[in-house]
């Protein structure tokens, strides 16, 4: 028998235990990550139990419109399942979640699917289940990813290689640090304000807190010339993938090829044993508007496009899955 339970602090251990053996979960789904912004979102997260055991988790929040989204505060959400869960059970659990929210009076569920390259073993049965429930793709983001396990190497652009050589010739060097203030204060924040009129999604205090609460998962690499910081990147590291959460450089850093040097080093040395290196999305405000300059730059390192799908599904359609599997 399947039952759905709302998340509260008493269920944190069950949540984390499931996440530790999940096929499609990452540390972003950990309560140690999610709870840093719990004051901004009304939590709608649930756990899936079958025969008394937790077999799935669903990070989510309520929106003012009345719908539930999984998850507005995360890059990706959706149903997170154990490695060995079969496809039939995965779709039964999805149906149970839809039914739960339907009975709660929620009509629409929006889900940002975990991109395939974050799966420890790629599977698409959750997406199939959403289609069975007549879910619709509301949005797609294009993300640039280097496949580090591919037998076919995509050549790097000569401009990226020349940039890295220029950095080396100018005695540019890289340091990993556990402190974020120098990059946030001297590079990232002023750069974002000047070029885009925005601040980083995470404040300095928040990123430092997340680093400290999620040991080994958030890493900061800075680039220097003569002890002056000229660029850097903040990496979110999962079991399969290194993701560039933030990338920024100063004018001097851009002139010296600091980021070319940095990312060739990270791809070839630091994260060479990962499956993927994720440079992040290249969409602008609209999903169909691409930042072509950013796309060109990221593909210069051998990255190519993967899509992340955002689904919207009516909760009443849980019955369409139940009819198939006699849940």
Image (spheres, rainbow, N blue to C red):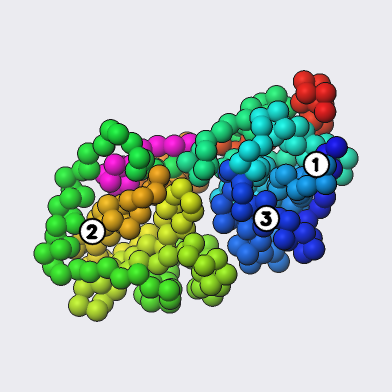
- Residue 309: quarter of image: top right
Tag 3 secondary structure = helix
The disc, 3 or 1, on the residue closer to the chain's N-terminal end is: 3
Extreme bottom residue here? 227
Does 199 sit above or below residue 139?
below
Q: Report the Cα–Cα distance between label 3 and label 1.
A: 15 Å
Does 137 sit above or below residue 148?
above
Where does label 1 land, which residue? 50
Mark closer to the observer (2, 1): 1
Quarter placement of the N terminus? top right
Q: Report the Cα–Cα distance between label 2 and label 1.
A: 50 Å
Quarter placement of the C terminus? top right
Magenta-colored stretch includes residue 58: no
**Residue density around tag 3, few if under 14, some if 14–19, many if 20 or more, within 10 Å:** some
Image coordinates of residue 308 in percent, x first then y, are 52, 39
Query: Residue 98's mark?
Result: none
Residue visible at 37% across and 62% down in the picture: 233
Query: Residue 261's mark?
Result: 2
Magenta extent = 295-308
Residue visible at 28% across and 46% down in the picture: 301
């Amino acid at each position: 028998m399947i039952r759905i339970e709302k998340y509260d602090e008493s269920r944190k251990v069950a949540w984390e235990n499931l996440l530790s053996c999940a096929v499609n979960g990452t540390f972003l789904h950990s309560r140690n990550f999610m709870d840093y912004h719990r004051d901004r979102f009304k939590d709608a997260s649930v756990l899936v139990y079958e025969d008394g055991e937790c077999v799935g988790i669903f990070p989510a929040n309520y929106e003012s419109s009345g719908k539930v989204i999984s998850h507005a505060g995360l890059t990706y959400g959706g149903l997170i399942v154990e490695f060995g869960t079969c496809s039939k059970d995965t779709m039964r659990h999805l149906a149970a979640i839809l039914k739960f929210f339907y009975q709660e009076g929620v009509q629409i569920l929006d889900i940002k699917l975990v991109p395939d390259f974050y799966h420890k073993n790629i599977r698409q049965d959750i997406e199939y289940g959403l289609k069975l429930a007549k879910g619709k793709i509301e949005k797609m983001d294009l993300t640039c990813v280097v496949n580090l396990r591919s037998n076919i190497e995509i050549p790097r652009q000569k401009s990226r290689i020349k940039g890295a050589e220029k950095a080396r010739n100018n005695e540019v060097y890289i340091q990993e640090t556990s402190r974020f203030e120098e990059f946030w204060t001297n590079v990232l924040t002023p750069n974002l304000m000047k070029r885009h009129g925005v601040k980083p999604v995470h404040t300095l205090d928040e990123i430092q807190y997340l680093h400290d609460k999620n040991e080994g998962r958030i890493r900061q690499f800075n680039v220097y010339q003569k002890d002056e910081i000229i660029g850097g990147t903040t990496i979110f590291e999962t079991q399969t993938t290194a993701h560039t959460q933030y990338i920024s450089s100063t004018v001097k850093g851009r002139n010296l090829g600091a980021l070319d040097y940095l990312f060739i080093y990270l791809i070839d040395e630091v994260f060479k044993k990962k499956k993927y290196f994720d440079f992040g999305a290249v969409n602008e405000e609209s999903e169909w508007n691409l930042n072509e300059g950013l796309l060109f730059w990221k593909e210069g390192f051998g990255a190519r496009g993967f899509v992340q799908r955002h689904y919207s599904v009516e909760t009443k359609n849980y019955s369409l899955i139940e009819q198939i599997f006699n849940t």
